Image: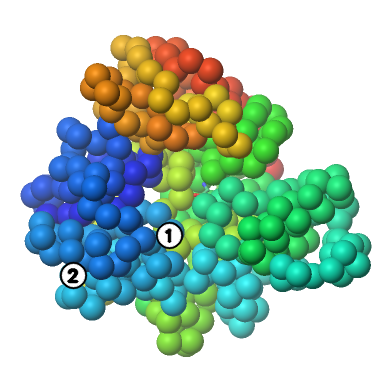
Amino acid sequence: MRILVIGSGGREHALLKGLAADPATTDLHVTPGNAGMAGLATIHADAGAVDDPAAMTALAQRIDAGLVVIGPEIPLVAGVADALRAAGIRVFGPNRDAAQIEGSKQFAKEVMAAAGVRTARAEQLQPGTGDAGVEAALDRFGPTWVVKDDGLAGGKGVVVTSDRAAAREHVDAVHALGNPVLLESFLDGPEISLFCLVDGETVVPLLPAQDHKRAYDNDEGPNTGGMGAYTPLPWLPAEGVQRIVDEVCVPVAKEMVRRGTPYSGLLYAGLAWGAEGPAVVEFNARFGDPETQPVLSLLKTPLAGLLDAVARGELASQPELEWEDGYALTVVLAAEGYPASPRKGVAITGSALGDAGKVLHAGTALGPTGDTESAGGRVLNILGKGATLEEARDTAYSILDGIELAGAFYRHDIALAAVEGRISLR
Ligand code: GLY
């Protein structure tokens, strides 16, 4: 099977790695790709914008792709999957209407309300809401304010703060972009990312993971797309995943079918587990980044066949997923200035850079002399695996010592709270 992957980040590098390991894959293509993917796939850097349905369909047709796997949310919300399906090409990823579960937080709230799924109380504030209206809405929330950009923000448009002035500032910044704001009540409890393969009403969960969204150690600094993640979660009881599937993912999948927008692809439930159990913080219509990197590294079931089964509408007849024992973890190496203004074009060197098994590329490109340089905020993902979470941590952090990128930084505490037994469910 010839497979085209759309995207350029660490998530797509992990997808390519997983797809390459499946004997059913004959060859891999990627657009626009990054500097680390050349050994795995033919890179189509200039095939057009990833959110251009006609350009993506033309590329898939030109290379005669048997399956297209869409990584990021922007092409999904732009209707790239619809165009590919209309052209008779199998695709892993939901159609535009179903991708609204990520594209519009208001839509996601409506689906959850209809499906009886626990989530935060929310109010939408349109641009143009006057000063008094914004202040009155802020009065109805707090002492911790959750202020979300109700447009596509790739996980980066959220501010969680106990500083009311900072909450107000973010409301104004989102409105200045012309986007609505979603104000939400704060959901307490440990966060979980659960990825489910969804094919209509069939829901198959992957291993649960935990992301680290803040830029700096001890959950300080601004929100990011994610600075590191680990899987599975030693503090989540065995029945925890099934409870999320039963209480959240299956009801939502059924509601999407009932609305006439059946879901096909990866449904990412971002949750907080509070006193009453799991509650939804957000849904995404795609694999999460960086959680995908450790999750797929433990998957033994061949990935290409699995994603193709979803694309064919045959998920229900797939055998149970198989996983490696142990733990996996990724640490993100971020460029100086990330997330506000990452410095690009900086040389990346070090003996570990070429270790394709443990170093996944995200924001990298080849410079004028053919050397690898930074080209985005999250530059590399370092992967560690081990029989214990501690061992996985040690592996990842020791590899980081062998990489140099001037001004770059990373978090030192990925999975540390779990290793030290500081996370528990109420
Ligand atoms: N890890 C957060 C996201 O993928 O949105």
Locate residue 92, reporting x and y percent. 29, 63
- Report the residue marked by disc 1: 74
Vertical comparison of 258 with 404: above or below = below
For residue 278, say whether it is visible.
Answer: no
Q: Residue 255 carries which label?
A: none
Q: Which of 121 and 272 is in front in this view?
A: 121
Question: Does residue 40 appear to the left or right of 402 in the view shown?
Answer: left
In which image quadrant can residue 366 be found? top left
In which image quadrant can residue 66 be found? bottom left
Question: Does residue 207 appear to the left or right of 413 in the view shown?
Answer: left
**Closer to the N terminus: mark 2 or mark 1?**
1
Residue labelled 2 has its Cβ within 8 Å of some atom of ligand 1: no
Vertical comparison of 351 with 202: above or below = above
Q: Residue at x 65, y 29 (%)?
A: 216
Q: Which of 292 and 223 is in front in this view?
A: 223
Looking at numbered disc 1 in the image, what kind of residue is underneath it?
Ile
For residue 340, say whether it is visible.
Answer: yes
- Report the residue marked by disc 2: 89
Q: Which residue is drawn at 31% across and 74% down?
A: 82
